[in-house]
Image (spheres, grey):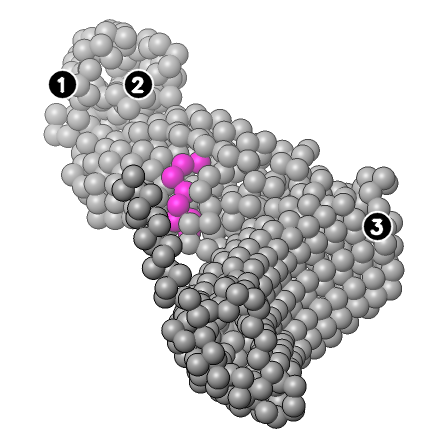
Amino acid sequence: MKNILCILSFCFLYQVINAGCPETKVILTSQSEIDAFPSKFPGCTDAPFGILIKESIPGDIKNLDSLKYLKSIGVGLFIRQNKALSDISGLNQITSLDTLFMVINDVLPNLNGLDNLSYIGSYIEIYANNGLLDISSLSKLQKIDGNFRLGGSFKLQNIKGLKSLSSINGTIYLSNLNIPSLDGLDSLKSIDGSLIIQSLKNLKNLKSLDSLRYIGLSLVVDNNDSLTSFTGLEELKKIGLLLRIRNNERLKDISALSEIPSINGFIDIYKNNSLESLYGLEFIDPRSITDLQLIDNPKLSYCSANSICKYLADPSNTATISGNDPNCSNRESITDDYNCTAECPGHGFGLSSQTQIDAFPWMFPKCHNIPYGMIIKENKTGSIKNLDSLYQIKDVNEGLYVRNNSALKNLNGLSSLEKANLVIYDNSSLENLDGLLSYKECEFGLDIVDNPKLNSLKGLKNLINFEGDLYIENNISLTSLEGLENIKLNSFDYITIEDNTALSYCELTNICIFLEDNSDDAKIAGNALNCASIVRVKAACLVDTNDNNNFSNQISITPNPSTGIINFDVLPQYHNGIITVTNSLGQKVADTKMINNYVDLSDQQSGIYFLTIIANNKKITKKIILL
């Protein structure tokens, strides 16, 4: 009962407050009608059925001051064809509108009066206001649940007043403006409809769209004479229906579109007289293209973007191609290009985002061995999070570079990689190399540098065949070189182990053997404990292991005492080990490989000697007597 009384009371109060408000659409055709609004509708703050302001006598309406009590306008506010209207500040209490339509108001210099407008529910059009210089009063407008058309105002200097606009649930149509940039759209993240940029004669790039990630329908860029590139669209991840690029006289570069994984419709590139390349469309899934038109782009010579190749390879896919450079003159000139027929990428190939990595399987479905190297390096902070889609790669010639990736935590996507010269550099979130368990061969060296969270190399435990230099530098969380123990002996040309401040375990058999005779080809410094220097590593190499009893039981040394020839018998897994013999003064008198099965001390004097065996990261020292 109380609820019913409250509702009735509210309705009564609303009727009292708005008793004098119009019950139909208000049409104001003169200044006198505007000035009479407060007396005709005393106490009214709401025009629920909308207002149309359109003068009947040219030059009669000059201001809207008498509408200053209005707080809301339903349906829409339509201000059109008023030759002398120069002031709309009487609208300054309006915070939201369903529709705002302002067209052909010849001397209106600004939109002062819309300073508190934050929301448009359906449609906004500001068009052909010849005297409009400034729209900064729209600075609180955050959202438009419909379409937005702005244009035909050639004196408008900029659109910075749109700086708070973050989403449009319809289409934004910018046309016939002389603005030099899109500064003001910096906060725009999504457009559910289309983005149409047409006849902006002074626009050179799209830089202020660098927050835009989503276009639900179409991107149309047409007749912008000064536009040279699409710089600014690097974050765009979605175009839902149509990509149309037409009549842009100076446009050379559309590479900023390289983050778009699918188009779900038509690609139309027509009469862009300076466009030379379709680089930027490589990563669009060809299965998402429904039609293709490449017409009258006279300098267009690179059309063999992977997506275009794959699309044209299917004869059932429709395409119209003509009037371009001979390399893009028809379907066959494109599909016969080397880039279209190659199974794997060519020189200088790189992947700089998650979108590009995820496209690799369909771009190169038969590629297992990359002939000319590959760089994996993010183009934006955090843009690469995993390498999962690179699962098919087995071999990379000329180097695989994984560098400068801030969000990459592991290399699990490289699970099939068997052979490569690896450079793993400055990956600030990388924790381990566990994804490299198939990695067996390195021909030109291994660099693991500046990975601050890397704590384990165990993923390299199957790396056996190695040639070149080993660099382990400035990995401040790394504590052990465990994982490198199976690299064959005498494989290294040079070793650098430096500034890994937590690294304390370096005394692997292969490291120990290398340092025994090649200390001049090594640099070890700035690490912890037993890895602090070459001297410290060599000393650690001579310390018996904790499980030396088990190791000792697996090695037979006979005879002891001996007259000179010492024989030893070991299990096959220790054949990669070495034996060093020192006299009672600590001087080395002999060394040999375990696989030789003996050491000859016949030229030594009788006495006590120490035989140190290092194999598979285990060390023992045995005393022998020469007779």
Identify which residue is drawn at 29% across, 13% down. 565
Q: What stretch is highlighted in magenta?
A: 404-411
Element on which disc 1 rests: strand
| Residue 615 spot, x, y in % from top left | 31, 21
> Of marks 3 and 2, which one's residue comes earlier in the chain?
3
- Taking depth in this image into account, of 238 and 355 the one nearest to the observer is 238
* Amino acid type, residue under disc 3 in the picture: Ala
| Closer to us: 547 or 419 | 419
Give the residue type that dot 2 points to. Asp
Left or right of residue 480: residue 330? right
How much space separates mark 2 and mark 1, taking CA atoms? Answer: 15 Å
Quarter of the picture containing the C terminus is top left
* Position of 611 relative to 285 (above/below): above
Find disc 2 in the rendering and name its residue: 600
Position of the N terminus, as image quadrant, is top left
- Amino acid type of the residue tagged 1 in the rendering: Ile
Residue 322: image quadrant is bottom right
**Mark identifier at residue 319:** 3
User: Magenta includes 559?
Assistant: no
Spatial separation of the CA atoms under disc 3 and disc 1: 88 Å
Circle 2: is it few (<14), some (14-19), or many (20+) Cα within 10 Å?
some
Q: In which quarter of the image is residue 478?
A: top left
User: Mark number for residue 608?
Assistant: 1
The answer to which quarter of the image holds residue 516 is top left
Residue at 66% over, 56% down? 218
Label 3 crowd (10 A; few <14 / some 14-19 / many >=20): some
**Nearer the observer, disc 3 or disc 2?**
3
